[in-house]
Image: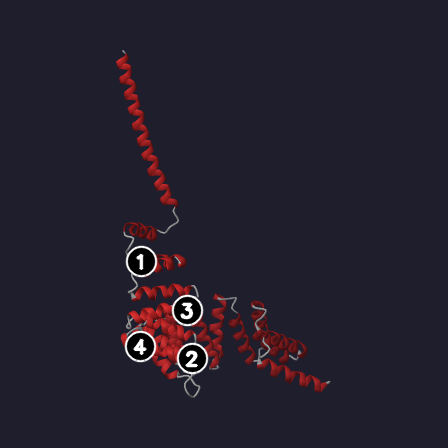
Amino acid sequence: MKRRVCVLIFKLANLLIITLIFSSCGNGKQEKHSAVVNDPTPADVRELNEKINNERNSADLYYQRAQAYFSHKSFASAIADMKIALKIDSTKSNYYTFISDLYFTQNKTRDTRDALRKAIKLDSANVEALLKYSQLFYLARTYDTAIYYVNRSIHFDKTKALAYFQKGMILKEAPNARGKVDTASAISCFQSAVEFNQNYFEAYMQLGVLSAAKKNPIALGYFDNALNLQPKSFEAEYARAKFWQDIGKYDKALQEYDSLAVIFPDNQDVSYNTGAILFEQKKYNDALQKFDLAISRNENFFRGYYGRGRCYEALGQKQKAMDDYKKCLSIKPDYRLAVLQLDALEDRVGKKQ
């Protein structure tokens, strides 16, 4: 009897142990699953974490994880990983190019410059590094050096659209020995950019803007190409309207501005330019409403006060005109048009008194 009781107790004990083991295993899986679900770490980073845990001395894995962090805008983590990657392997030019991007996002221009110098020293044909180094000098308006490095990048890759676009931007701003910019060469560069990349929106816009400045109707074709790429682009549609305005085709310009006003009702420039056209057409009351609208969008929009002042002056409301000119100059004291208009109006009013 005692033996049977002992056997029964032994079986019950085993059953209890097995139950506890399986219960424990089940809870572990559930906790693990819960931890994964609640883990805010992006999946691509988690995957790389596991790989790095198994291979601590792989510079490339840290480089890959830095890229993943960068895509998630975790810039500090990305920089930390790149420093580890470079400590393991400091011979990779592309590592320095990438960390320069990270430094640039943090406005660390000196670190950006130093990283790009190392990238170029390791690989003089690193086109990406050469272009970014050129861009730093462009932003600093050191145009000669910017041109030198962008030309070096083109020497190693003659089909890179970005290089021609960047060179065009430099030439568009860099004064020559006579103090003038080489617009023709800039246009040629932008044309090369769209030749190598027919979907280059920014290059079409630059071609349009430079052509519009010469009042060349070819500008419209460039703006149309830009709009084909980005149909809802305010920049391209506005540029078209401004071109029509600048060449005196007011009806077409107003049609474009009216369309823009529907899509971008809060834009002060659209209201102002519409008012300017209506003023030229001597529709002073209608123009006044547009300048009022522009000012309501931005109470510090000095040109709005100037335009409204012109309307008041044309309507014979001289005091209101002077008040608006003065308001304009209180915001922008060196706005010459308002200075001249106010001086002339005060002179006329003074003579009458």
Q: How many marks?
A: 4
Residue 60, percent from left and from top: 29, 58
Marks 1 and 2, how far apart in space?
A: 38 Å
Q: Tags 1 and 2 in contact by the CB under 8 Å rule?
A: no
Q: In which quarter of the image is the N terminus?
A: top left
Is residue 289 among the parts visible in the rendering? yes
Q: Earlier in the sequence, mark 2 or mark 4?
A: 4
Q: Which residue is drawn at 37% across and 50% down?
A: 41
- The answer to whether residue 29 is above or below residue 333 is above
Residue 93, percent from left and from top: 30, 67
Of circles 1 and 3, the one toward us is 3
What's the amino acid at mark 2?
A: Glu
What residue is shown with label 2?
173
Q: Quadrant of residue 324?
A: bottom right
Q: In which quarter of the image is residue 353?
A: bottom right
What residue is shown with label 1?
64
Of circles 2 and 4, the one toward us is 4
Q: Tags 1 and 3 in contact by the CB under 8 Å rule?
A: no
Tell me the tag on residue 110: 3
Q: Residue at x 29, y 51 (%)?
A: 51
Q: Which residue lies furthest to the front in this view?
A: 87
What's the amino acid at mark 4?
A: Arg
- The answer to whether residue 148 is above or below residue 12 is below
Q: Residues within 10 Å of mark 3 (few under 14, many from 20)?
A: few
